[in-house]
Structure formats: structure tokens, C-alpha cells
Amino acid sequence: MELKDLVPAEGSKKARKRVGRGPASGTGKTAGRGYNGQKSRAGGGKGAGFEGGQTPLARRLPKLPGFRNINRVEYVPVNVSRLDAYFEAGETVDGDSLKAKGIIKHSDALVKVLGDGEITKSLTVKVDKVSASAKAKIEAAGGKVEEPC
């Protein structure tokens, strides 16, 4: 069997209806659209989203979804396992050192240290926020946490 031998199954292909081809065709003159009215004309019809004159759903709903809190504060999360991997014992962890090591993109970004993983080195952590589990792990390793007031 070759590509040229492939043919569609019998009865699966149906010729499209050719309308407006004379009175003997069965769909001549008005081409099956009737005599008058909106749907008999070119471009006729209501259009997508038309609801019979009622204000459409797209106009009843607010423009943007959800609620956006203008006072929301976003923190860049950094786990203690990353601090353990990137920093040596005795080093200070702050925005500038995190930026220098490539952990965060901007040194002025707000950083929160989270407690995922283990830490074995004593570090001085000076970031915006530290979770309770991260603080416990850092202090257990001999480090200290200095949060801004």
C-alpha cells in the first residue's frame, strides 16, 4: 500500500451545498434564506455576545478579575539550604551579599528566609523577615538573626 492508494471511506465525504445557482437548483433566488429580514442579508445576524438587548455579560462584569490589594508586600523567598550552600561560616547574609552571590536579582528586594533544608554554618542573617523555623535552625547552627525593627 502506498500514499496514492489511500481514499476516504465510502459516504464520508459530502459535497457542499451550492446556493443561488438558478431556479432549478432548489436553492436559487433567495438561496435558502427566505425573503426579508436581518438573517436574509449579507452580514446579518446578531453577533457574538448579543443577548437580545440585555446588557451583555462582557459589559456587566468588572474589567479585571479578582481583588488586587494595593498594600500587599511581596518578599523574595530564600531557604536556609541555599544559604548553607552559598555562604561560608561567619559571613553576613544581607541584600547586597545575596545579590553578589546571584541568589536574588535586586539588592533592594525584600527578602524572607524560610526554613526548608538544613544549615550547618554559623551565619549572621540581616534580612527583612525570617520564619520561625528558619530562625531556630540558624540559631541552632550557632548563627544569629538580626531583623530590622
Image (spheres, rainbow, N blue to C red):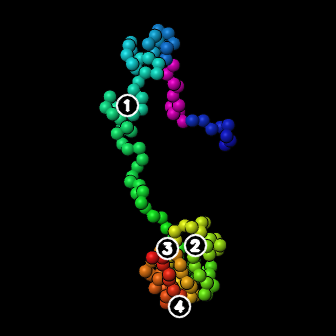
Helix, strand or loop under label 4: loop
Between the C-alphas of marks 4 and 1, the distance is 68 Å
Between the C-alphas of marks 4 and 2, the distance is 21 Å
In the picture of the structure, the residue carrying the numbered disc 4 is 142
In the picture of the structure, the residue carrying the numbered disc 3 is 128
* Circle 2 or circle 1, nearest the eye: 2
How many neighbours does mark 3 have within 10 angstroms: few (below 14), some (14-19), or many (20 or more)? some
Q: Earlier in the sequence, mark 1 or mark 3?
A: 1
Tell me the residue at 39%/26% (across/down): 46
Tell me the residue at 39%/39% (across/down): 58
How many neighbours does mark 1 have within 10 angstroms: few (below 14), some (14-19), or many (20 or more)? few
Q: Is residue 9 above or below residue 116?
A: above
Q: Is residue 73 above or below residue 1?
A: below
In the picture of the structure, the residue carrying the numbered disc 1 is 50
Q: Earlier in the sequence, mark 2 or mark 1?
A: 1
| Quadrant position of residue 100 | bottom right
